[in-house]
Image (cartoon, rainbow, N blue to C red):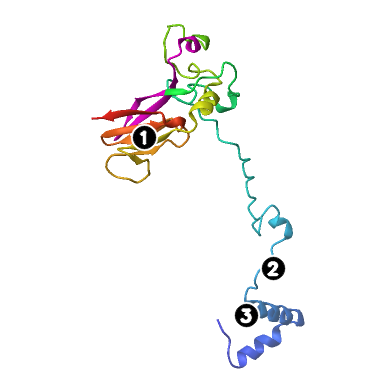
Amino acid sequence: MTVRGPHARTAMKRLSPFGLALTALLAAGACSTPQDEGPTRPDALAGRNLIPEAPVDAPSPTPTPDDDWTFPPGSGGGGSGAAADARPCGEPLPPPISRVNVKVLSTQAERLVLDATPLVGPNAAYCRQIGFTDDRQFCPVRPEGDPERSDCEALRAGRPTWTANGRPCQTGATGTHCVNHPSNQYLVFAYGTGTFRACVSGGVCGTITIP
């Protein structure tokens, strides 16, 4: 209750100096506004990462060379065995190529894989000397899987070239056409029907007709 008029002055006179001081202090506190808290203590921020660290780039993998490709079994170009295992064509050196055997190696979606195998002969003695014991007259320059086969074929056959209905192989063609295999020139992808031909050094060719 608020005391007004002469009664208020009487009440003030009754307060001692200590009471007046206490009254003033309480009045000041009632009118004051709460102050903002001071800064957080440093130890309260311990372990807190305020500035994000820059990401550390992962080390780049060391590039490795591509694996050596291998010839499909039964195909020209060395049969099985990696290119790194091949060595120069040694004795007996093969005679000149006389035939090129062309066959369907496999059937894939919308295309065939054709294989060309250069043959030497008729020379039963040579065929027998390199390991063919069935008295055949015509044979590859080396048996399938022989590490010298690739080099002996390169020596006598060179790099075969393919055509489809007389036109060189090309990517993106339509109709009857062929596309060279990316790593084995003795193989080709054949599309459509017609005559596919593989020719080697010396103008010796082999053909196959796809009906």
**Numbered label attached to residue 31:** 3
Residue 200 appears in the picture as rendered: no
**Residue 28 included in the magenta stretch of the image:** no
**Of the residues tagged 3 and 1, which is closer to the observer?**
1
Examine the structure image and report whether residue 116 is included in the region drawn in magenta.
yes
Residue 37 left/right relative to 150: right
Q: Mark 2 points at which residue?
A: 38
Which quarter of the picture shows residue 44? bottom right
Q: Can residue 157 be seen in this view?
A: yes
Dot 1: element:
strand
Q: How crowded is mark 3: few (under 14 residues within 10 Å), some or many (20 or more)?
A: few
x, y percent for residue 198: 38, 31
Give the residue drawn at x 41%, y 28%: 204
Q: Which comes before the other along the chain, label 2 or label 3?
A: 3
N-term mark: 2 or 1 = 2
- The image quadrant where one finds the C terminus is top left
Q: Which badge, 3 or 1, is on the more N-terminal residue?
A: 3
Residue type at mark 1?
Answer: Phe
